[in-house]
Image (tube, rainbow, N blue to C red):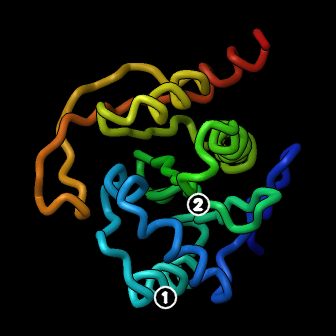
Amino acid sequence: MFPELKTKSLTLRQFKHTDLEPLCSHINNFAVSKMLAEVPHPYTKEDGAWWIDFCQKTPLSEKIAWVIETPAGFSGAITLMKLNSDKPILGYWLAEHLWGKGYVSEAAEAVVSYGFKTLGLPVIYSSALEENTASLRILGKLGFRKPVKGFATPRSRGGESLADISVSLTQEQWATRLAEA
């Protein structure tokens, strides 16, 4: 059964085929797609249909992809990927018109908590392009540490190699952060 999560102002739910239009509309914005490793630009309806099918068919033991639903409706996505590996990864994106409202921080807090408390993950990894200061700020607020500089080649940028920062958060660091809050 899909693990729907609710926060103060969000519902994190499973992708549905009716999400195709808003998915394509929001992620086809280059301001969004240029920060994501695996997302092409332009983003077509075929890309969106493939993604929704992939999310619905992939076992939850491997990947969980939630729709971020705000009061405005479908607003983005957040995922825990590579759950069956020793390096589970947190990823997310949000529609540009909703940036700066705290929605990603709220969604990421819920997903990280789920990963540690429910799934028992010992560590969660994430990364962001060095130019994506907003995402790096969110990860820092959540307690992600040990930045490692590297490079990424986002699909939307045609093979351009860009500075990337990888970070990690252990279950112990998360527990300490919660105890101090």
Identify the mark nearer the N-term, 1 or 2: 1
Residue 154 visible in the picture:
yes
**Looking at this rendering, what residue extends furthest in the right direction?**
8
Q: Quadrant of residue 32?
A: bottom left
Amino acid type of disc 1?
Ala
Instruction: Give me the residue at 18% from left, 52% from top.
Output: 153
User: Residue drawn at (25%, 63%), measured in percent from left and top?
Assistant: 156
Rounded to the nearest angstrom, the CA distance separating label 1 from label 2 is 15 Å
- Residue 24 image point, x, y percent: 49, 77
Q: Secondary structure at mark 2?
A: strand
Q: Which quadrant of the rendered structure holds the C terminus?
A: top right
Relative side of 42 to 3, left or right: left
| Viewer-proximal residue among 85 and 133 | 133
- Badge 1 local density, few (<14 within 10 Å), some, or many (20+)? some
Q: In the rendering, at what x and y percent does residue 48 appear? A: 47, 81
Residue appearing at x 52%, y 22% in the figure: 140
Amino acid under label 2?
A: Ala
Q: Judge by depth and name the residue closer to the eye, 84 or 25.
A: 25
Question: Where, by quadrant of the figure, is residue 176 drawn?
Answer: top right
Using the image, determine if residue 118 lies above or below residue 168. below
Instruction: Check the image and report above or below for 140 versus 134.
Output: above
Total numbered circles: 2
168 sits to left or right of 6: left
Vertically, is 67 above or below 125?
below
Judged from this view, the residue extending furthest toward the front is 97
Identify the residue at the far top of this view. 180
Q: Is residue 113 visible?
A: no
Q: Position of residue 113 (x, y in %)?
A: 71, 39
Task: Please name the residue that numbered disc 2 is placed on.
Answer: 77
Question: Which residue is identified by label 1?
Answer: 49
